[in-house]
Amino acid sequence: MTRIFTVRSLEQVGVGQTAAVADVPGADPISLRLLEMGLTPGIEVAVVGAAPLGDPVELEVRGYRLSIRRREAALVTVAS
C-alpha cells in the first residue's frame, strides 16, 4: 500500500488538525528559534487554536502548548 502525503506549510493546517514537521528551512534567526522550540523534522504537531483574527496560532508539540505568529508558521513545512 502506497501512502500519499500532502506537503504544505504549517500556516495552512486548520484548527483541530495534526501534521508532521517535514522541514524548517533556512538559517535565519526565526527558523533557528522554531527549531529550538521543538519544531524539528519528524515531530507531530497539532493546531489547537487561533486568535479571533487568526494570529497567533496555538500549537501542541512535544506535550506542551506553543503560540507562534502565522508568518512564522509559514516557514515550517509539514506533511499530513
Image (cartoon, rainbow, N blue to C red):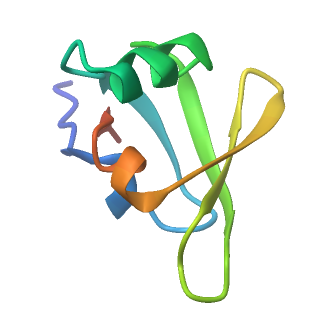
> What residue is shown at x 59% (from left), y 67% (from top)?
15
Which quadrant holds residue 17? bottom right
Which quadrant holds residue 75? top left
Which residue is situated farthest in the bottom direction here? 52
Apparent side of residue 69 relative to residue 38 in the rendered image (left or right)? left
Apparent side of residue 46 relative to residue 33 in the rendered image (left or right)? right
> What residue is shown at x 47% (from left), y 15% (from top)?
35
> What residue is shown at x 55% (from left), y 27% (from top)?
44
The relative height of residue 42 versus residue 20 in the rendered view (above or below) is above
> What residue is shown at x 39% (from left), y 29% (from top)?
30
Of the 4 image quadrants, the one containing the C terminus is top left
Residue 73 placed where, x, y %?
Answer: 40, 48
Residue 70 placed where, x, y %?
Answer: 43, 60
The relative height of residue 62 versus residue 69 in the rendered view (above or below) is above
Apparent side of residue 28 relative to residue 31 in the rendered image (left or right)? left
Which residue is situated farthest in the front direction here? 29
The relative height of residue 64 versus residue 46 in the rendered view (above or below) is above
The relative height of residue 7 versus residue 52 in the rendered view (above or below) is above
